[in-house]
Image (cartoon, grey):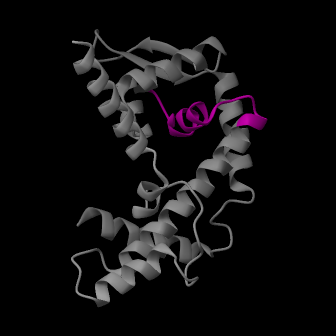
Amino acid sequence: MANTRGNAQERGQAGRTAAASPERDRRGPETDQKGPERGQKGSETDRTASEADQGHQSLPAADWRVCGLVNALARRIETHVREHATALGLTAPQAVALRELTGPMTLRELAQRMSCEPSNATFVSDRLEEQGLVERRPHPSDRRAKQLVLTPEGTALRERLMASLATESPLSPLSDQEQDTLQQLLARAVVR
């Protein structure tokens, strides 16, 4: 029995080691580690382009480059939101919830808008309620449901948050027209 346990522990350890290995981090665009910049020798996009040229079945180099750029932009936006949220005494998920609460909505609706599980939206809304920023009210047409509504304090903080997020946005180097074009192109690529 001890031998079986030892083997299972070794297999578990090997699985954790493989999952956390630097080699795994270099294989795909999901990595958070900084690698060589595009065009530098040994970069992910260069390796992918080389593989594609050799007839390998992999994503085209352009797909890897776009994926890397989208991931980098997402990280910059997440950092931007986190910094501005922290300055206002909020966590990033609380800031996202305040941003999405444009009117009364159920927790399920909030979870969908936040792209998270309902239990996460419940946790975030509980913290916002403790801070006096939202309150739960009966749903007008569904007696079983409650709606989240911003309090006057929550509305004021949401306005400050939105004004703060608008400053030095990661997309601010782009014109309004360029931002619209980027959004349209990304939406077309995602909706396929």
Q: Is residue 28 visible?
A: no
**Residue 41: image x %, image y %?**
55, 83
- Farthest residue to the right: give it: 87
**Residue 31: image x %, image y %?**
48, 55
* Image point (58%, 17%), residue name: 127
| Residue 165 within the segment the image draws in magenta | no
Q: Is residue 83 visible?
A: yes
From the viewer's side, name the closer residue of 183 and 52.
52
Locate residue 5: give its quadrant.
top left
Above or below for 22 versus 110: below
Position of the N terminus by quadrant = top left
**Residue 92: image x %, image y %?**
61, 36
Which portion, as a residue range, is magenta? 86-104
Above or below for 149 versus 12: above
* Image point (44%, 25%), residue name: 120
* Image point (46%, 73%), residue name: 44
| Residue 95 within the segment the image draws in magenta | yes
Above or below for 17 versus 173: above
From the viewer's side, name the closer residue of 10 and 163.
10
Above or below for 141 versus 186: above
From the viewer's side, name the closer residue of 115 and 6.
6
**Residue 78: image x %, image y %?**
59, 49
